[in-house]
Image (tube, rainbow, N blue to C red):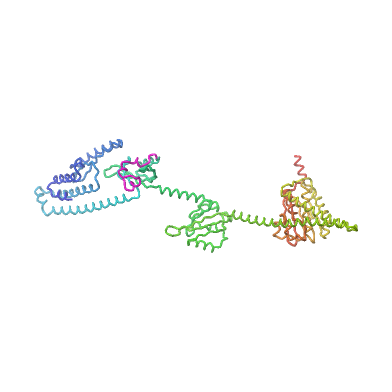
């Protein structure tokens, strides 16, 4: 400010202005000032009009020819109606602008104070060097100089801070023109592109941005329309490698009124990689066949995947904000669930099986693994549970266990069956051979011979039945039995069975009778007589065998579209646990009846095979110690209906 202190000691306004202009030229240099003069308001207005005309020409010129029009005028208010004008060909720094403006403002203040007094020329000479008003103005100038110095100091500190922020930014920052020229670059930009600042300036936007990126022109168009833009582009390093960056760019006017733009670039390569991994992880979780649920520590559901919806029936919107109680079946002890949750919140993992309930009320089994979610701070903020619907798996395991048990049972029954078959074959065979030897003995009476011959016949029949049973069960198992249908009179079939088994019933003092028959007009059916007769005979035979006193009643009736036969006895009955297996092969061999009751245990299995082949079914009702009722049904096919269909 020594220039200002010197200028205010000059005598006339013209001298002060001339001294200010010379001082500014000295400060800026001869080459930096094209012209310096004092202008009136009218002259300033005239120059502004001329400058606007030059700008209009500049806007219509190609980009490459614009620089020759960049002649910027600077006007500083000097006094009422007058300006100091500087025509500069170079851009002033903020420090230079501040210094010039401060000098002009201080001198303007000094001259304005002098003009208010309007002293004579002689008074001016005396007052300038007097200690009165002159000293007062000097003091004001000194105060203003101090204020300006503080302002300049703050401005300098602000500029240093901005420069420090610019140089230490983690993003590349470029000062550019909208046309693509680059004026400066920060340190991070040099590191990002592998270039020096001079190389970046020379390269321009075309040298840094991948020109083949289709997003480039779109972003430029948005910036021209809205003044700023944010998006992503591919950039090119000095070594030719490409990387994707996030770009933020704005257009503004500098202190000369020239259009400028900023480019702030952030390398998002690592971010993209993380995003890709997160996207992959997100898709994996969402598409996982396992149900995945994330809750906060109080238990409120924050996330469920598609599998949760598929397994439970609850849509995502229905589940979010709820707790896992929405699938609680109520079969687990609440205390157990509370202790489980508390254990997880304390940092422990839990895994196990729970039986839960779907939205439709259906129960299902889940294998669940629950883990706490730790933050970097060591705090547990969420709980994640991975859930697998194991209902079918448990059913399969249960079925396998049952199948294993059945296989073991079947193996045991087969062993018992083979032993029993061996007995059923050897016993009558021994009887036949033994009695045949006795018949060879001389001196036998006719009565003894007849008795021995009856025993041989009985043993032969027993052996033949055993062999027939084995042959029939083999046919059934191999699918080699066939239905041979013909006209069958049900009443005749029942009467035949009664006549056939009455002698055996009388031997045991049992009453055998037919209790029910279809009406005569419904008795004639179309069916396989041999298989129906075999089934009915086998059931009556078993009833006589397992009944020691009482009666045996059998019959038949029509119900809906089925013809039902039944045999009821007052025998030993069947235990509840045995009723489901009496129709399995070899079972009679393991009912602890092998000694008092002869047989292979194949009879009911053979009947079941016959009835199934006739598209019917067989079942039993029994009470242990009181007797049993065996039923079997076949489709009711009256002969008249068959003939009618055939004639049509």
Magenta stretch containing residue 205, yes or no?
A: yes
Find residue 396 and report its image quarter. Answer: bottom right
- Residue 406 is situated, as x and y percent measured from the top left of the image, at 67, 56
Q: Residue furthest left?
A: 122
Find residue 368 and report its image quarter. Answer: bottom right
Prevalent SS, magenta region:
helix
- Relative to residue 434, is residue 589 drawn left or right? left
Q: Is residue 299 visible?
A: yes
Query: Where the C terminus falls, by quadrant?
Result: top right
- Relative to residue 391, is residue 206 drawn left or right? left
Magenta residue span: 185-212
Along the line of sight, which residue is nearer the eye, 551 or 448? 448
- Relative to residue 201, is residue 141 drawn left or right? left
Residue at the (71%, 59%) spot, across then down: 578
Along the line of sight, which residue is nearer the eye, 215 or 352? 352
Q: Is residue 42 visible?
A: no
- Residue 280 is situated, as x and y percent measured from the top left of the image, at 47, 49
Magenta stretch containing residue 563, yes or no?
A: no
Residue at the (45%, 49%) spot, across then down: 277
Q: How many marks?
A: 0
- Residue 242 is situated, as x and y percent measured from the top left of the image, at 39, 43
Find residue 399 and report its image quarter. Answer: bottom right
Identify whether 146 is placed above or below 41: below
- Relative to residue 226, is residue 498 drawn left or right? right
């Amino acid at each position: 400010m020594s220039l200002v202190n010197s200028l205010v000691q000059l005598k006339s306004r013209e001298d002060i202005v001339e001294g200010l202009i010379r001082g500014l030229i000295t400060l800026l240099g001869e080459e930096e000032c094209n012209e310096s003069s004092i202008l009136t308001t009218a002259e300033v207005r005239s120059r502004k009009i001329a400058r606007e005309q030059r700008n209009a020409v500049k806007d219509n010129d190609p980009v490459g020819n614009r620089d020759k029009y960049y002649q910027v005028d600077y006007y500083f208010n000097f006094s009422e109606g007058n300006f100091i004008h500087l025509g500069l060909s170079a851009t002033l720094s903020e420090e230079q602008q501040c210094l010039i403006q401060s000098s002009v403002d201080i001198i303007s203040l000094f001259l304005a104070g002098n003009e208010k007094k309007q002293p004579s020329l002689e008074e001016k000479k005396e007052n300038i060097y007097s200690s009165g008003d002159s000293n007062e103005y000097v003091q004001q100038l000194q105060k203003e100089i101090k204020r300006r110095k503080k302002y300049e100091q703050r401005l300098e500190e602000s500029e240093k801070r901005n420069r420090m922020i610019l140089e230490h930014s983690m993003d590349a920052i470029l000062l550019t023109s909208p046309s693509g020229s680059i004026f400066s670059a920060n340190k991070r930009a040099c590191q990002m592109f592998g270039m020096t600042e001079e190389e970046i300036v020379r390269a321009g936007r075309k040298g840094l941005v991948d020109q083949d990126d289709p997003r480039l022109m779109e972003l430029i168009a948005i910036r021209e329309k809205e003044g700023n833009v944010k998006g992503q582009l591919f950039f090119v390093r000095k070594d030719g490698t490409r990387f994707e960056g996030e770009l933020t760019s704005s257009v503004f006017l500098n202190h000369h009124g020239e259009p400028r733009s900023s480019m702030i670039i952030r390398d998002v390569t690592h971010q993209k990689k993380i995003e890709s991994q997160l996207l992959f992880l997100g898709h994996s979780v969402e598409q996982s066949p396992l149900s995945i649920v994330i809750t906060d520590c109080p238990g409120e559901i924050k996330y469920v995947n598609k599998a949760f919806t598929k397994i439970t029936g609850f849509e995502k919107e229905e589940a979010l904000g709820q707790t896992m109680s929405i699938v609680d079946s109520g079969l687990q002890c609440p205390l157990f669930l509370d202790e489980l949750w508390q254990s997880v919140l304390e940092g422990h993992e839990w895994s196990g099986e729970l039986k839960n309930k779907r939205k439709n009320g259906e129960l299902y089994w889940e294998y669940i693994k629950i883990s706490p979610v730790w933050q970097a701070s060591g705090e547990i903020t969420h709980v994640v549970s991975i859930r697998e619907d194991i209902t079918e798996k448990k059913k399969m395991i249960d079925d396998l266990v049952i199948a294993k048990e059945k296989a073991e049972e079947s193996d045991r029954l087969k062993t018992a069956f083979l032993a029993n078959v061996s007995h059923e074959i050897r016993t009558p065979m021994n009887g036949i051979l033994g009695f045949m030897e006795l018949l060879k003995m001389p001196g036998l009476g006719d009565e003894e011979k007849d008795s021995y011959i009856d025993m041989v016949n009985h043993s032969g029949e027993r052996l033949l039945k055993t062999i027939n049973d084995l042959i029939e069960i083999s046919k059934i198992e191999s699918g080699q039995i066939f239905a041979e249908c013909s006209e069958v009179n049900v009443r005749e079939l029942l009467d035949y069975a009664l006549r056939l088994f009455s002698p055996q019933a009388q031997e045991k003092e049992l009453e055998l009778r037919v209790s029910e028959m279809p009406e005569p007009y419904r008795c004639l059916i179309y069916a396989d007589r041999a298989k129906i007769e075999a089934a009915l005979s086998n059931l009556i035979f078993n009833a006589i065998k397992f009944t020691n006193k009482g009666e045996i009643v059998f019959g038949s009736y029509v119900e809906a579209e089925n013809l039902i036969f039944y045999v009821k006895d007052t025998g030993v009955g069947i235990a509840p646990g045995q009723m489901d297996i009496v129709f399995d092969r070899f079972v009679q061999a393991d009912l602890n009846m092998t000694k008092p009751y002869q047989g292979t245990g194949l009879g009911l299995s053979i009947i079941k095979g016959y009835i199934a082949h006739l598209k019917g079914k067989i079942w039993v009702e029994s009470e242990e110690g009181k007797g049993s009722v065996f039923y079997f049904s076949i489709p009711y096919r009256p002969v008249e209906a068959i003939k009618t269909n055939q004639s049509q």
